[in-house]
């Protein structure tokens, strides 16, 4: 597979916060949003997804969410109003002047995509990965596991799930205070709003991924949704080559 160079850019979002995005390839714009606790590099570049899609003729636009990666990580709670990630996503689309593009996300990235679609984003097609229906309809309490980890760093037994999550945080150079504040920004999307999304949408989830409820139910609710199951659970499915293959086949269909 061709080795595509990655370019990093920055822009000022709606409230003055400086955010980063990364680009790979040329061609049709495809915006892909990463999940909570992760980065654009880990979700989309590390496992070859971006390279596969770039080789197929897409211009990959990969933002680092507020409080993640190379984007700003403010500690002021006022920088984390409800739906801030949706507003950042819309600001990026506006900044780039995108009118004919595709959009996708994994986990929190998929929830952010749904919030963007519900608030007027108009991509040609969209991909929702690693997200089930309850993770869209009822966001209160989502992220409690991460809240427990972030508020008890250094206290977990070596080898435990929490210890491994903390180790992952260190590899991403995550900012615990900023990441905690993201958890207060989630907004529910009512069922009727999901059912009104007109774009063709692929819903992709690991066969053992039940972290956010049923992905099949999301696809069934959408007017033009299709469900694809790939191997893995919520944490491992994002590393599977089947993820990028499913997105590519959908975008080319």
Image (cartoon, rainbow, N blue to C red):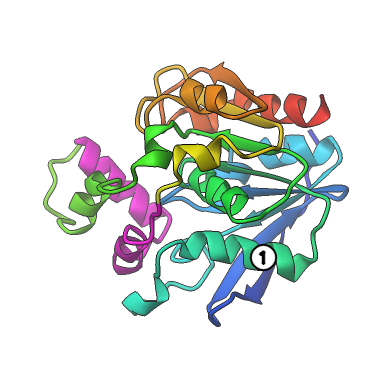
> Which range of residues does the magenta coloring cover?
160-187
Which residue is more in the foreground, 137 or 2?
A: 137
* Residue 122 position within the rendered picture, expressed as x and y whole percent measured from the top left: 72, 50
Residue 173 in which image quadrant? bottom left
**In the drawing, does residue 245 fall left or right of residue 33?**
right
**In the drawing, does residue 169 fall left or right of residue 52?**
left
**In the drawing, does residue 47 fall left or right of residue 237?**
right
Question: What is the crowding at mark 1: few (fewer than 14 residues within 10 Å), some, or many (at least 20)?
Answer: many
- 181 falls in the magenta region: yes
Q: Quadrant of the N terminus?
A: top right
Q: Is residue 141 above or below residue 133?
A: below
Dominant secondary structure of the residues highlighted in magenta in the image: helix
Residue 13 in which image quadrant? bottom right
Which residue is more in the foreground, 151 or 77?
A: 77
Residue drawn 67% across the image and 39% down it? 126
Mark 1, residue position: 92
């Amino acid at each position: 597979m061709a080795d595509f160079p990655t370019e990093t850019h920055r822009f000022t979002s709606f409230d003055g916060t400086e955010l980063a995005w990364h680009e790979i390839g040329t061609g049709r714009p495809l915006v892909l949003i990463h999940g909570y606790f992760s980065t654009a590099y880990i979700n989309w570049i590390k496992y070859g997804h971006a390279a596969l899609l770039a080789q197929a003729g897409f211009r990959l636009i990969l933002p680092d969410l507020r409080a993640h990666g190379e984007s700003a990580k403010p500690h002021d709670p006022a920088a984390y109003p409800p739906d801030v990630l949706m507003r950042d996503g819309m600001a990026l689309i506006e900044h780039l002047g995108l009118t004919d593009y595709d959009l996708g996300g994994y986990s929190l990235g998929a929830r952010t995509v749904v919030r963007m679609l519900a608030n007027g984003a108009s991509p040609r097609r969209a991909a929702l990965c690693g997200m089930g229906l309850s993770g869209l309809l009822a966001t209160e309490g989502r992220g409690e596991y991460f809240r427990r980890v972030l508020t008890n760093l250094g206290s977990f037994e070596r080898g435990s799930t929490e210890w491994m999550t903390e180790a992952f945080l260190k590899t991403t150079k995550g900012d615990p205070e900023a990441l905690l504040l993201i958890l207060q920004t989630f907004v529910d999307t009512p069922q009727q709003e999901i059912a009104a999304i007109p774009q063709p949408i692929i819903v992709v989830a690991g066969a053992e991924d039940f972290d956010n409820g049923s992905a099949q139910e999301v696809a069934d609710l959408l007017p033009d949704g299709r469900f694809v199951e790939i191997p893995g659970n919520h944490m491992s499915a994002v590393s599977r080559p089947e993820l990028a293959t499913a997105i590519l086949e959908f975008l080319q269909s």
